[in-house]
Image (cartoon, rainbow, N blue to C red):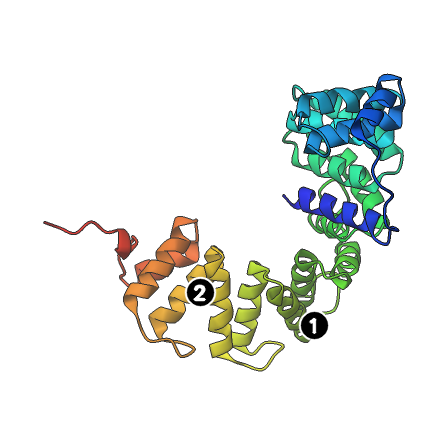
Amino acid sequence: MRSLALLALFAALAHAGEATADPPVPTAEIQQQAEAGAAEAQYELGRRLAVGENSIQDIFAAARWYLKAAQQGHVDAQFAIARCYLSGEGITANAREAQDWLTKVAMAGVVEAQFLLATHLADGGTLAKDTSGAVRWFVAVAEAGVPEAQEHLGRLYRDGEGLEKDAVKAVLWFSKAATQGNADAQYALAGCHRDGTGTAKDPTKAAALFAAAAKAGHARSQVAYGRMLGGGIGVAKDVTAAVGWFRKAADQGDHEGQAMLGQCYLQGLGGLPRDRAQATSWLWKAAEQGSDDARRALKEAGLPPGDPAKAVPKP
């Protein structure tokens, strides 16, 4: 999903500031040019057929026209047919064809294709996993200034995946992405400042970064910032505010947020009443997702190991 969102952003940026477009060329005229072999017309006809613009939607015909234009070297068409081969939209899915076309477009310098290729090579889902190939393209996209790639490259350096482990370089790339507002990078960089990994230990900077990402809706940062507020680490102690952040994360389904909120209900912290039913419910939600902290809290408090709302009453 993140890849699709980023591609939408790329598209928006590509068209930003364009002058008012001329009236569109009629589809019949575009089709005539496409049938005469004009690659640009073939691509445009494919695009219109794919979305049903000034024509009946036909994803199969769209893929055929994309392929014709791609075979003539039309880069946008090559990118379009690569995505068709990836998704199986309008054509039989084919990982090898998808990778070949994506690589052509990436080699042509199209950043969107470089990022998409890197992501698929790193995931090893649709395309065969290729960590070294993924690293190559993530580096290219990160150097082009794309924050999602910068954050990913930071993780590769931090974890030593496909690259020699280097905490300092990880911090460098996290910083570049965090400066652009990337919440994942802000979270990662905050952890580095909190723990003193690859940079000086600075709880104040860590708290500020966790807060920025938390306010953007980043669930793990909401939990981390809540913990810092609850302990008065790098920020003035405020248990009530901490509980508020735990709740925001819990409401997003984050198991750490659910576990923390459950324990707050158990102890009556931050203005919450002591409520064993609420505590059990939240701790159970977290335990169901694999939270050892939640399971331990349930056991230590002698609470039932299941959601009371789902308990079957005895006859």
The crowd level at tag 1 (other Cα within 10 Å; few <14, some 14-19, many 20+) is some
Quadrant in which residue 90 is drawn: top right
- 271 lies left or right of 75: left
Looking at the image, which residue is at 56% across and 65% down?
222
Which label number is shown at residue 205?
1
Quadrant in which residue 84 is drawn: top right
Q: Position of residue 124 (x, y in %)?
A: 66, 32
Which label number is shown at residue 260?
2
Q: How many marks?
A: 2
Amino acid of disc 2: Met
Q: Earlier in the sequence, mark 2 or mark 1?
A: 1
Q: Position of residue 313 (x, y in %)?
A: 16, 52
- 145 lies left or right of 282: right
Q: Nearer the viewer, residue 201 or 255?
A: 255
Which label number is shown at residue 44?
none
Q: Position of residue 166 (x, y in %)?
A: 77, 52
- 274 lies left or right of 240: left
Amino acid of disc 1: Lys
